[in-house]
Amino acid sequence: MCGIAALATTGETKKQTVRILLEALRSLEYRGYDSAGLAVYDEDEGRIKVWKRKGKVETLVRLLRGVRISAPIGIAHTRWATHGVPNEVNAHPHLDCRGEIAVVHNGIISNYLELKKELIEKGHVFKSETDTEVFAHLFEEEMKSKEPFEAFKSAISKLEGYYAIVAITSKDPERVFFARKESPLIVGKGSDLNMVSSDIASLLRYCSKVAPIEDGEVGWLTWREIYVEKNGERVAVGERFFRPPWTPEQATKGNFPHFMLKEIHEQGTAVKETLMSISTDPRVKEVLELLEGRVVVVAAGTSLHAGMVFSYALGKLLGKDVILLDSSEAYHLEKLLKDTVIAISQSGETYDTLKAVRIAKRNGAKVIGVVNVLGSTLDREADISLYTRAGPEIGVAATKTFLSQVTLLLYLVSRMSGVELKDPHLLVESSIRKSIGYARSLAERLKEKQSMFVLGTGASLPIAYEGALKIKEISYVHAEGYPAGEAKHGPIALAEEGFPVLIAWTPEDEEKLQVAKEEFASRGSEVYWVGPRGDIVAPESDWLHLPFTITPPFQLLAYYMAVLKGYDPDKPRNLAKSVTVH
């Protein structure tokens, strides 16, 4: 879940290499922010220079303020720790013994201890606890008898696990080397530079066209050329390149203090764009035919909650049984992954979801991908891809991508059932306007609480789960979502004076919610209603449109709780947006 960026450039742009890489790291910071680092080849001094800092990218930016270097190549990294504690020593890039090779890596090298032992026996000295540093020394060892690219490939061939690896060497100061196995890499073409990165958003400002690197491919780039091969054969990648559907401005905060708040306010537009796109997508006809049969949904985190909305709606309107699997558990039930599988992932790179997809394809299933990122792994591996049109989402906590997923999935339900999905974007916009003040006020009351429940029933239950997740993710309050009727089967044991309980309204069964409210209130709990006539007011709606009215209040509540407690809602601790590791 680390973020990688690298470039090769020429002319006057060489003086901007450090700045461009820092800009790319800012766009990649959602992938990890335990530490950040950067390495460039200083052509005036003829050597690689490295800067690293523990913490967020801004600490590295401050360190490099005033640095002036002309560099034809450079690599950068923002880390989410997997091997070794988050500190400067373990931060990437990592060097070989001579300081002639610099490496950045996203993934896990599972045989690194075995390789490290062999390299130590050959005289290599290690400084960090990471698996990544092993590759720098392995590359160095191979360079003793091979030219750089052959040495790079030979070193890659010795790795077990999964990775995206990018490296530079002072012995070849025009080329950036890269390799991919199960971790995302995207190459981009610019006017006087070429880049490689973990995602599209970091390439938007400087690259007019981008292309995914496929599993098992290795290659290199200079400022004028991108070379890729697989299994020793050159691969023509020209046809893969496409123009990114996003603008650089979409990946900035604009006038908002945080990406999360901006993305909450963008939800009306995201929902509208998604509905317009899916309603004219010719692939929907084939998808609807596939949905007539047995359906399994695999997803993780917020995407799983979108799957719950879909499953509930199909069951309620059509009596259709949908198997819903948390993708991290799906491999235990791989015999279920057959017929039609819907895989939902914002990034299209979620490791567990992709693992489930590959099992499903081995079982002969047809895979429908619901994804926000064109060219992502899920987009390429699914038999049919349906795109949400949320635009880039930089905040780690999913907001607009959730409602975009819900929009797309409920559109499929409406086509199957004949029940119309009516102007959901207007409901979202109305909900934000009505609830924002109430959400901030309630956040003031709840910000010091250590634990709470979020209850729902029927159509509001997935929103209760999602609301609890948002509160947990960014305000660090232990929040648990439960069915309202389940509370008396154990959870109510925690009810006491001042214990907060949030209730997600639904028009289907207000009586059940009222009973739950009274059960907790009678034991001294503070009970808050989210919906029409509630403590956080949201618009009236029928059950089908409920996600568009009561989701934004929970997002806003979580956001303001985090801000009032002094936390950065865009970068919650221990989390990364795109979970590409086990």
Image (tube, helix red, strand yellow):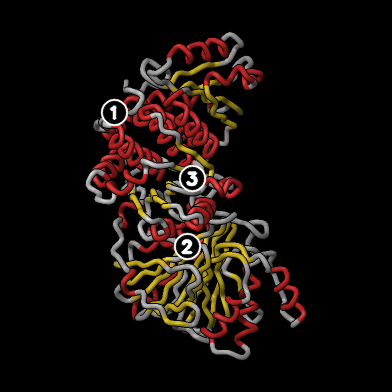
Secondary structure beneath dot 2 equals: loop
Q: Nearer the viewer, mark 1 or mark 3?
A: 3
Question: Quick one: quadrant of the N terminus?
Answer: bottom right
Q: Please state the horizontal and vertical placement of residue 211, each as a whole percent of the image.
A: 36, 67
Secondary structure beneath dot 3 equals: strand
**Is there a contact, CB below 8 Å, between mark 1 and mark 3?**
no
- Give whichever of discs 3 and 2 has the lower sequence position: 2
Residue holding disc 3: 298
User: In the figure, residue 555 lies in which quadrant?
Assistant: top left
Label 1: how many residues lie within 10 Å, few (<14), some (14-19) or many (20+)? some
Question: Disc 2 and disc 1: Cα gap in Å?
Answer: 38 Å
User: Residue shown at 43%/69% (left/top)?
Assistant: 213
Label 2: how many residues lie within 10 Å, few (<14), some (14-19) or many (20+)? many
Q: Please state the horizontal and vertical placement of residue 174, each as a whole percent of the image.
A: 44, 83
Q: Please state the horizontal and vertical placement of residue 151, each as a whole percent of the image.
A: 57, 84
Question: Disc 1 and disc 3: Cα gap in Å?
Answer: 31 Å
Vertical side of 5 occupied by 547: above or below: above
Mark linked to residue 60: none
Mark linked to residue 430: 1
Looking at the image, the residue that sits furthest to the right is 121
- Give whichever of discs 2 and 1 has the lower sequence position: 2
User: Residue shown at 29%/29% (left/top)?
Assistant: 427
Residue holding disc 2: 184
| Residue 108 in view (yes/no) | yes
Question: Quick one: quadrant of the C terminus?
Answer: bottom right
Question: Would residue 394 appear left or right of 97 to someone viewing this image?
Answer: left
User: Residue shown at 42%/49% (left/top)?
Assistant: 346
Callout 1 amino acid: Ser
Secondary structure beneath dot 1 equals: helix
Label 3: how many residues lie within 10 Å, few (<14), some (14-19) or many (20+)? many
Vertical side of 219 occupied by 538: above or below: above
